[in-house]
Each structure stands twice: as C-alpha cells, then as structure tokens.
Image (cartoon, helix red, strand yellow):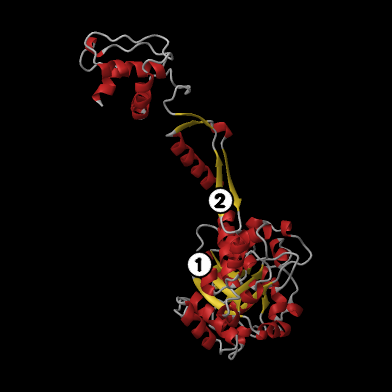
Amino acid sequence: MMQERKLDVAAPSAAARQLGRALVVTSGKGGVGKTTTTANVGTALAMRGARVVLVDADVGLRNLDIVLGLEARVKHHVLDVLEEKVTLEEALVRDKRSEHLFLLAAAQTREKEDVDTEQMRLLIERLRADFDYVLIDCPAGIEKGFKNAVVGAQDAIVVCTPEVSAVRDADRAVGLLPNSFRPQLIVNRLRVQLVKKGKMLSVDDVNDILRLPLLGVIPDEPDIIVSTNKGEPLALDPISPVGASYRAIAARLAGEEVEVPGVREKQSFLGSLSAFFGGRS
Amino acid sequence: MFGFLKSLFMSQPSSETAKDRLRVVLLADHLSLSPEVVDALRTDLLAVIRRYVEIDEENVDLTFEQREKEVAMLASVPILSVKGSISSEHDSRQSPEMENTDALPLAAVEAESTESTESAEEEEEVQPLEGESTAMVEGRRRRRRRRPLEPEPEPLASTSAGAASPMGQVQSL
C-alpha cells in the first residue's frame, strides 16, 4: 500500500494538478542511448519549467544516477519504496542543477523478478500525481524488466541507432508495446558523413522500416562522452548541437512544432542536417 | 549465377544492403511472431486449392523459409484427386456441386469419347432408346463410364418437364 504523504517540495496539491505524462524510454537493444536520452530529455523538460521525475527501472544495474552526476546523493532506490522501507520523498534525489528535476534510482543488489509489476504501476501513478513528466528508463531486453518499465506508462519513446541490430530489436520492442501507445522515434548516434557516403542507414531508411512519428535525431558527437564523464547532461550546454537536439525534443513533447531538419527528402535532409549540426558530423 | 548475383549485391552501398536485409529479416520475424496471421493464410489457401482438387488436409505442410534476398512460403499439399474424376471418393454422392462440375471437363471427355465409343471399357453396352438422338446416347455412355456405380439415368423421353434427371440438367446447359 502506497503512502499518501505529499512531497515536501513546493508543489500544487495532487487534486489541483492534472496527472502528468508517464513515458517509457525503450529500445529493445542495449547500449543505444536510452539512459543518456532519458537524462537529457528530462533535463531539457525541467529547463522549460516542467516538474520532471526520472525513474531508473533497471534492476541490478544502475545508470541514470551516474549519467546525471548524482551517484553520491543516492541513498535509496525503487525497491526500497515499493517494499515501503522508505517513503517516496526520502528516496527521490533532487538534481544538482535543475530544481524541478528528480531521480528515483534503480536497485542494484536485487533482481528483476523481485519487482512486483502491479506495485510498479501504482508507483508510476503516484508519481504522475506529483509531476508533469515521469520518464521511465527501461532496461535492455524484452522480458520482466521491460514489462515492469512499461506497465505504468501511457506512451513510449523508442531510441534506435542506425544499425541493423538496433533496428531489428526496436521493431520487436515496438511490437510488444500496448496497442494504446503511439510510440515516437529518436534516432541516436547519426553520423551524417557516413550517411552521405552510403555507409550508414539514414533516418529515412530507419523509419521506412519502423514507421514511427519522428521525435528527434541526435548526432554522434565526442561531446556526449565528455558529458557523461563529467556527469553534466548536454541539454544544459547552449553551444552543443546535441544539446540543441535534446531541447528540440523536449519542445516537441510539450506540443511545440519544431521542425526536424529536412526529414522528407534525403538530399535536403543531409544538407540541412549537416548545417544544423554545424557541419561537424 | 550465384557469384554474379552476389557481386551485384556487393556493389551496392552498404547502407542499401543493410536496408534490404532488414526488410527481409523483419518479414520473417513478423511471420514467425504472428501465428494467427499464418493460420488465416493457411485456411484461405487451402480453401482456394480445394476448389480445384481434393486434398489430404491432415498432411498439409506450410512453412516459411528465410533466404538471402527474400522470405519464401513453401506449401506441400498432397492431392488426392482432381474434382469429378473416376478416382474421386465423392463419386457415389449425388451433390448438386458434382452435377455442375460434370459439365466442366465435358469438352475434353467429348474428344475422348468419340474415339472410344466402340471400346471394350464399357461393362454394359448402352442401347439407344426410342426417341433418343445420337448425342443423347453418347451422353449416357460418357456418364456410365465416369460413374459406374450410379444407376442408369432415366431417358429424357419418359420424364416430365422439370424433373431433375442428370441428362435433363446437361441438356439445359
């Protein structure tokens, strides 16, 4: 049974606010950038003034905290909350830089089978009452971890890199999402020069197969690893084209019409994408 | 041939190769992941085949084979007989369906029968009846050969209009 205490941070009462949106960030394949995407999109949404909570739904592996630079501040995790060892308020970690951004860390020493799916669903529902956005970082795979991550969500963001394995796995993962979902695609680690040379699948190539509304495109940049090295999401960086892409994604999620550069025709797409990313890709 | 095709394939940009391979592999994945679709396809396929031949449904084998550039559906459908032939097990049934399909191979059988009117295949000689035309006699002879288990149909002369005799039906066509 979930406790009913309100969060001790300034927030309108649950009755007054609308329920927030819970989105699961998934991919099927591991290592394509779900965690980095969750951290950055969450940061970008919080920068716009939204109240955001990021939930690391992995069990056994903990990543969201380290990507955000919050690893030293994590004292409790999801399972502690589900098993009522601590309150939700005690487990939530506020971000260093964004006052509206919170993290609920993964349980490291437990197993996916320890998580009760129904309890997870109730937790996400509880979070929706207190936040505008609940972003759930889904573990790789399509078994129990995937199911637990999806159960509380209303919709999904599918992260996919332009590679055969990633596309195949993304297709499989999309097939397992509830029919009510309208998943959107983020193509991650695009290298425009390789696409131009015909050595990498283009965004259109990927989406001709997956056929999802395109939420955004993230270029592959050295900035990214530097940002995770330091625990500083690129969404905060006003200069980085990667940061700009993440902020554009947040704007689109919030309902703004932000054009994804030339996504209709391959020629102009590459041209404008190259220009958009400062010709560095 | 394969070597030539392969080199043609290889000269594509690798992203094209990737796209082609993904299309094929996902087709195979989707087929193997939705048994309902495959079942429906099988049902419809066999229904179409049954319009032309009798099949041994229990021994039908339907599989999907993933190849390099395509997914192929392989169907093994044992055929018991062509519809309306002597060897068909449905010969003794007098279904309306059988009546109509009689008419279909008539052209082929007609060609045959003009050659074999005098053949020793007939167990019992068909005698022309009073008022019967040559065509009518031929018709009876052909039907006797195809359905030896059936009783001799009534000649047209002795039936009233509207009687559902086999000859009457053929005549009306």
Quadrant position of residue B58:
top right
Rendered location of residue A109, percent (x, y): 79, 65
Judge whether B39 appears above or below A70 on screen. above
* Residue drawn at (70%, 78%) of the image: A67
Q: Is mark 1 on a helix, strand or loop?
A: helix
Residue beneath label 2, please? Answer: B72
Amino acid type assigned to the residue bearing label 2 in the image: Ala
Which quadrant of the figure has residue B83?
top left
For this view, does A60 lie left or right of residue B158? right
| Residue situated furthest right in the rendering | A109
Residue A190, horizontal then vertical, whole percent: 59, 78
- Viewer-nearest of discs 2 and 1: 2
According to the image, label 1 marks what residue? A208
Q: Residues within 10 Å of mark 1 (few under 14, many from 20)?
A: few
| CA distance for labels 2 and 1 | 22 Å
In the rendered structure, the answer to whether residue B83 lies left or right of residue B63 reads left
Left or right of residue B163, residue A238 in this image: right
Quadrant of the drawing holding the C terminus of chain A: bottom right
x, y percent for residue A117? 65, 57
Quarter of the picture containing the N terminus of chain A is bottom right
Q: Is residue A9 above or below residue B60?
A: below
Looking at the image, which residue is at 65% across and 83% down?
A233
Dots 2, 1 in contact, CB < 8 A: no
**Residue A222 visible somewhere in the drawing:** yes
Mark 2: which secondary structure? strand
| Label 2 crowd (10 A; few <14 / some 14-19 / many >=20) | few
Residue A261 in view, yes or no = no
Name the one closer to the observer, B42 or A45. Answer: B42
- Where residue A38 appears, as percent x and y from the top left, is 62, 74
Q: Which of A161 and B80 is in front in this view?
A: B80
Q: Mark 1 lies on which chain?
A: A
Q: Residue B61 carries which label?
A: none
